[in-house]
Amino acid sequence: MTRAWQRLQGRSLLRDTDLDPEEYLSLLELAEELRDEKRQRVERQRLTGRSIALIFEKTSTRTRSAFEVAAYDQGAHVTYMGPGETQLGHKETIRDTARVLSRMYDGIEFRGFAHADVEELSAGASVPVWNGLTDQWHPTQLLADIMTIGDHARKPLSDVTLCYIGDARNNTANSLLVVASMLGLDVRVVAPEGLLPSESVQATARDLADASGARVLVTSDIDAGVAHADFLYTDVWVSMGEPMEKWGERITQLLTYQVNSELLTRTGNPDVRVLHCLPALHNADTELGAQLATTYGVSALEVTDDVFESDASLVFEQAENRLHTIKALMVASLTGE
Ligand code: CP
Ligand code: NVA
């Protein structure tokens, strides 16, 4: 029996909508199978002898680790090229880099700034390219998020209410809105004016919702947005690549949109669960957290420490699922079997 994820062989994942809903859900099924194999210590290696290039123009903990461990688990090798460590952009065009790496590697992961860069890399490459985050999209993140939601929802995805709250025009929010719209969820995106998704991302979501039956609400009204949410999702208020000076303005705009215990109560759902792609600024125990605490007098940003550490929080399951979903993506793109 052929399965929808097998259609991914030789294909790239640059944005979430490169997969159709059937392929998306099928890939998540493969991820579950791979997770089971690993947990039972019976993992079959499908990528023996393959080589994967990992290019990171921004820093990473989860995405890098997930690609590396997934590759090792499956018998493949990786080369990590961190920020500033390649000729890319300085002495060599993206297209030339793509052609060189395609002669040596079977697949290329790329984390960068402008989304056009990963598209250019993919256009020049003759092997699959996986977007490990750009300023506009974070497709490998959403695979793990939907897997985590599926693990906990106890109902079909079409009955799930997923609410993203915070800086809603960043990569994670864009990917969340289009994926949830494509898969037929009740999706709400809540942010103040100026931090809502672009018109074009909203239009894509509406088109996808027309086809899937998803309900889409984009609003600045917190109570309308969070009402009856099964899952509340937030992300950092200033993303990688944005200037530090943004923090003051964002804190003013977003403090009322913080995920805290009062916001959980406002959902009206005592079982609401909390999601975050991480890293999260939930206390002042990091260099940046301490700096923001001193400058702006805030001890937590997008999510409070008590909520982050509570039983409602699924953030570390999400992080683990990055491994299983990225592994499924590489297996599907590289083998189709
Ligand atoms: N969630 C995520 O992409 O984390 P990293 O930046 O650590 O890869
Ligand atoms: N929006 C965040 C996601 C980090 C995984 C950023 O781009 O910094």
Image (cartoon, rainbow, N blue to C red):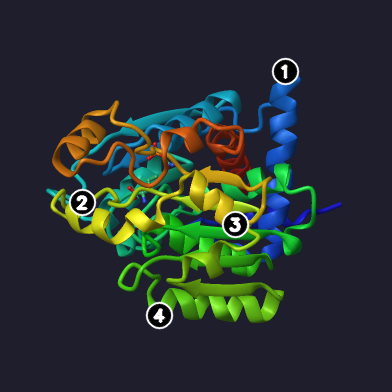
- Judge depth for marks 2 and 1 and give the one in front: 2
Q: Amino acid at mark 2?
A: Trp
Q: Which residue sits at x=21%, y=29%? A: 287
Residue 170 lies in what quarter of the image? bottom left
Q: Amino acid at mark 1?
A: Arg
- Residue denoted by label 3: 267
- Residue denoted by label 2: 247
Q: Front-most of 175 and 190? A: 190
Q: Tag on residue 41?
A: 1
Please tell me in which quarter of the rendered image ligand 1 is found.
top left
Q: Are marks 2 and 1 in contact (CB under 8 Å)?
A: no
Q: Front-most of 175 and 300? A: 300
Residue 74 lies in what quarter of the image? top right
Q: Residues within 10 Å of mark 2 (few under 14, many from 20)?
A: some
- Residue denoted by label 4: 199
- Judge depth for marks 4 and 2 and give the one in front: 2
Earlier sequence position, callout 3 versus callout 4 = 4
Q: Residues within 10 Å of mark 1 (few under 14, many from 20)?
A: few
Q: In 3D space, how far apart are the residues under numbered discs 3 and 4 (Cα atoms)?
A: 27 Å
